[in-house]
């Protein structure tokens, strides 16, 4: 990951200015792989250095969560992942009352902890958030930078606290974000993955993979991506995690075609679509390949 020298200097100043509490030091973890995309990385770092929050939006498999994890690591901040779903409400974000030592105490939720310790909070699939959950975020994300906890103290956000929201388009249960919430973010539309980016990403995770199989696997992913954009198949097969899982199994000795079927083809549960995906896979992954042909 490379950023400009000026941004790198500001980043070092930020890290020196804001320490990390010992009890959350374990949350500062290096991501499994770097984010590939210098331009997007520089935009994100610039916004966070200026105290802004980020909204990363775009298609599936564009590296939104990977970028968020890399940003937390670059800034040296504890990471809190908050996944939004139909049951996420204000109490699951801020905390709930619990009975400890014969008294009622607040069991702090991830938003509360992130605010208190200067963490980076990843608001995953924010466009699935209910109104009750969104209402908590308004005061947290704007210039007030506070959390009002009913019955408890008002919490001011640690100056290093930042929030990075992610959203995919068109998932079941999602909805359009309201204008007030969007105004609290700087927005980055994540570029679709291309062959160069995908190749660099897979090589960073699997440095021992051979060139030709890598080229074919990248081509397979991009073929499926094109088919999904044209509406010929769903996006279920566009699964970067599945592709990487398949590579792990190939490295472990499983035949490449079987590994790809497990990681990609079988993600579709519609028989007709699964046959289409299998045909695309066969054009890229010969049945005769063994794991030694890939690694």
Image (cartoon, rainbow, N blue to C red):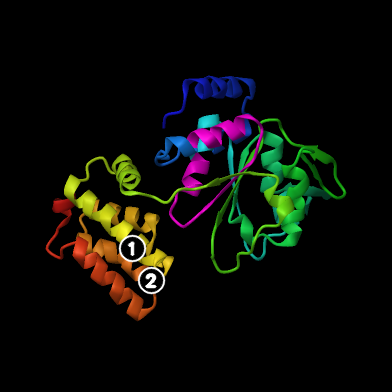
- Count of marks, rendered view: 2
User: Above or below — where is 269 with respect to 223?
Assistant: below
At x 61%, y 29%, the residue is 49
* Disc 2 target residue: 233
* Disc 1 target residue: 224
184 left or right of 173? Answer: right
108 or 183: which is nearer to us?
183
Question: Does the magenta portion include 62?
Answer: yes
Residue 209 placed where, x, y %?
Answer: 22, 45
Q: Which of the two discs, 1 and 2, labels the residue nearer the N terminus? A: 1
Helix, strand or loop under label 1: helix
At x 22%, y 42%, the residue is 208
The residue range painted magenta reads 41-69
| Quadrant hosting residue 27 | top right
266 or 78: which is nearer to us?
266
Task: Report if the CB atoms under discs 1 and 2 are less than 8 Å apart.
Answer: yes
User: Above or below — where is 53 with respect to 220?
Assistant: above
């Amino acid at each position: 990951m490379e950023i400009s020298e000026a941004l790198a200097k500001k980043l070092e100043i930020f890290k020196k200015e804001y320490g990390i509490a010992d009890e959350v030091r374990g949350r500062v973890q290096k991501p499994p792989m770097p984010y590939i995309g210098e331009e997007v990385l520089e935009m994100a770092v610039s916004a966070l250095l200026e105290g802004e929050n980020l909204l990363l939006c775009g298609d599936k498999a564009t590296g939104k969560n990977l970028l968020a994890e890399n940003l937390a690591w670059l800034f040296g901040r504890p990471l809190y992942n908050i996944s939004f779903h139909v049951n996420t409400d204000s109490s699951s974000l801020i905390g709930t009352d619990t009975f400890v030592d014969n008294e009622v105490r607040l069991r702090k939720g991830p938003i509360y902890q992130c605010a208190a310790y200067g963490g980076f909070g990843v608001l995953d699939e924010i466009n699935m958030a209910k109104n009750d959950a969104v209402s908590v975020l308004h005061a947290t994300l704007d210039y007030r930078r506070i959390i009002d906890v009913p019955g408890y103290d008002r919490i001011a956000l640690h100056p290093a606290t930042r929030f990075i929201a992610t959203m995919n388009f068109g998932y079941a249960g999602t909805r359009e974000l309201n204008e007030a919430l969007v105004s609290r973010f700087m927005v980055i539309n994540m570029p679709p993955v291309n062959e160069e980016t995908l190749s660099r990403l897979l090589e960073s995770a699997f440095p021992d993979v051979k060139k030709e199989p890598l080229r074919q696997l990248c081509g397979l992913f991009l073929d499926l991506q094109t088919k999904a954009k044209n509406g010929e198949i769903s996006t279920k097969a566009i699964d970067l995690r599945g592709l990487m899982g398949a590579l792990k199994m190939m490295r472990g000795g499983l035949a490449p075609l079987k590994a790809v079927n497990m990681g990609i083809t079988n993600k579709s549960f519609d028989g007709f679509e699964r046959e289409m995906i299998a045909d695309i896979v066969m054009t890229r992954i010969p049945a005769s390949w063994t794991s030694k042909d890939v690694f």
